[in-house]
Amino acid sequence: MSSEPTPPRRAQLAYDPARDAEGVVHAVFRREELLFDPKVSGNRVAFLRAERGGPEWTADADALWPVPPPEEGQA
């Protein structure tokens, strides 16, 4: 059994280790679908934005980790 989690999906909060930041996944595309160089190494490119807004960034979708929801009483 693999300990690797399933990459986050659209609208999920994710951790981007390359940027050391958390963001909401807004979209995921295959690299060849894009009309620009996303400057990431993977074949799938995720577009993320911080939960409370801010600039969007791109990340290797397969390198993202899902952020678990806060436990009850921690929110």
Image: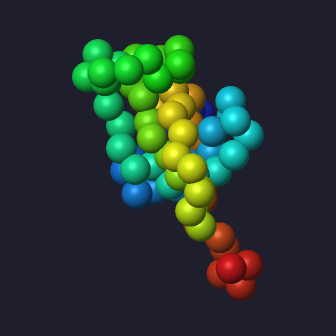
Q: Residue at x 45, y 41 (%)?
A: 47
Q: Residue at x 53, y 20 (%)?
A: 40
Q: How many marks?
A: 0
Residue 35 in view in this figure: yes
Residue 47 against residue 2 in the figure, above or below: below
Q: Residue furthest bottom?
A: 73
| Relative side of 44 to 66, left or right | left
Identify which residue, 45 or 3, lies in the foreground: 45
Q: Give the x, y percent position of residue 44.
A: 39, 25
Identify which residue, 34 or 14, lies in the foreground: 34
Residue 6 in view in this figure: no
Q: Residue at x 26, y 22 (%)?
A: 33
Q: Give the x, y percent position of residue 25.
A: 45, 49
Identify the image quadrant of residue 70.
bottom right
Q: Give the x, y percent position of residue 58.
A: 51, 34
Q: Give the x, y percent position of residue 75.
A: 68, 79
Identify which residue, 9 or 48, lies in the foreground: 48
Q: Residue furthest left?
A: 33
Residue 2 against residue 70 in the figure, above or below: above
Q: Residue at x 73, y 40 (%)?
A: 20
Tell me how the rendering is colored: rainbow
